[in-house]
Image: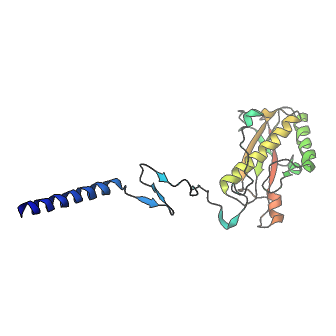
Amino acid sequence: MKLTKFSNLMVLGLALTISAAGCKKRPTGITDIPGGGTTHVGGGEKTIDNNLPQPTFIPPAPPNGDVNNPNNGNNLPPRNPNDIIPLSNRDFSTYIPDRAALAGATVYFDFDKFSIRSSDQSKLSEVANYLKSHPGTAVRVEGNCDERGTEEYNRSLGERRALAAREALATMGVDPTLVETVSFGEDKPAVPGHDESAYAKNRRDEFVVLNPPK
């Protein structure tokens, strides 16, 4: 009788030991993947069924379904301006800005683009000729965008628009160290409004003459 009880206790103890060991193998904080496998959110080994579609991070789109954003299949290519024209490290803070001198030379861009239109080449020639005829004078190229898209994306797009003009001026013989670039993104619209007629005027490069201090 005692032997039977002892045997039963041994079996029960063995079952509890196996159960406890099994519980220790299951990590905490796991997320089940439908169809098989689990990913351990809390760290540790990751086991995923390779036959299932793997998770992909998709950055959130900007509000209101705007398409002027990095996820519209029209991504901006990586830019390293030093591969083409070294950026200037000159300080123009003491120069005197003149917005009127080249106000008529503003160039405009197609939606989500930063290439200079062929129809605006004459405006860049006007800027180049002005700088050549005024030795020591510099220019600030201000890149701007319409309001569609994220602030970060538009800041980057505005920068590329300003740099595109700078590179074009350099090919026309302008000293690139006399061309300063800045991007305002969507922060400084030229025309208020939320339609294409306003957007077309806001996608632009403006040229501000920087006269050397006297």
Closer to us: 10 or 74: 10
User: Relative to 13, is 36 on the left or the right?
Assistant: right
Q: Is residue 87 visible?
A: no
- The percent position of residue 136, horizontal first and vertical second, equals 83, 32
Residue in view at x 85 percent, y 47 percent: 116
Residue in view at x 37 percent, y 57 percent: 28
In the displayed orientation, state which residue is furthest to the left: 2
Instruction: Say how many tags the image has.
Output: 0
User: Relative to 68, is 124 on the left or the right?
Assistant: right
Query: How was this image coloured?
Result: rainbow
Q: Is residue 160 visible?
A: yes
> Which quadrant of the rendered structure holds the N terminus?
bottom left
Above or below residue 105? Residue 62 is: below
Residue in view at x 70 percent, y 59 percent: 149
Closer to us: 43 or 83: 43
Above or below residue 189? Residue 178 is: above
- The percent position of residue 213, horizontal first and vertical second, equals 77, 35
Closer to us: 107 or 71: 71
Res 133 → quadrant? top right
- The percent position of residue 191, horizontal first and vertical second, equals 80, 62
Residue in view at x 69 percent, y 66 percent: 65
Res 186 → quadrant? bottom right
- The percent position of residue 198, horizontal first and vertical second, equals 81, 63
Res 214 → quadrant? top right
User: Relative to 84, is 118 on the left or the right?
Assistant: right
